[in-house]
Image (tube, rainbow, N blue to C red):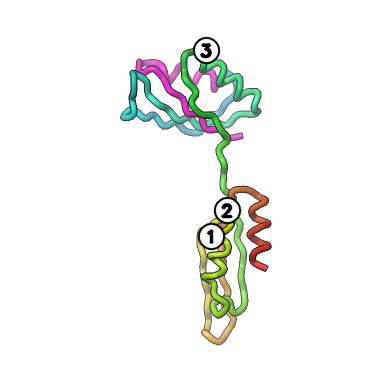
Amino acid sequence: MKVGLDIVLRDVPGQLVMALEPISKFGGNIISIVHEREAIKGGRVPIRVNVEVESNENLKRIITELEKQDIWVSKAGEIKKKEKITVLLTGHIVDTDLRDTIDKMNEIKGVMVADVALAMPHPDKESSARMDIEVSEKAKAKTALDRLD
């Protein structure tokens, strides 16, 4: 699972390397690090580390080890990844107000229409549209698809 760790280190050389050791020790794979040097307060600097860990147990071990080293863990949480579904709409979709369909999708919490490509050969003929929809979780995809019916 992918996890974001917001940690606060003492602003002295070697602290970042020391903070990364427990992540490696307990099987974490570092995805990214954001070192916020301009946000130093009280001699401490905030760091955002995104990691992939095998289990909650390994995450707990990492956090415990960091805290033993006087590294503050201000936040730890799973990184939510959006999923994308693509649907094809056909028919007189312009006449039935494509904008209304987009608005209905965007009203659903955790659902957003990210892109629409429209093909309209002639105003009197049927049109087609490819709609890319981003959802925060799989259950939201079903809700969005049901709304299209």
The residue depicted at 52 percent of the width and 84 percent of the height is 122
Distance between the alpha carbons at the discs numbered 2 and 3 = 40 Å
The residue depicted at 34 percent of the width and 18 percent of the height is 43
Q: Quadrant of the N terminus?
A: top right
Q: Nearer the viewer, mark 2 or mark 3?
A: 2
- Disc marking residue 109: 2
- Disc marking residue 113: 1
- Disc marking residue 68: 3
The percent coordinates of residue 73 (x first, y second) are 50, 23
Q: Is residue 132 above or below residue 33?
A: below
Q: Quadrant of residue 23?
A: top right
Q: What amino acid is at disc 3? A: Lys
Question: Is residue 122 highlighted in magenta?
Answer: no
- Marks 2/1 in contact by CB < 8 Å: the verdict is no
Q: Secondary structure at mark 3?
A: helix
Q: What amino acid is at disc 1? A: Val
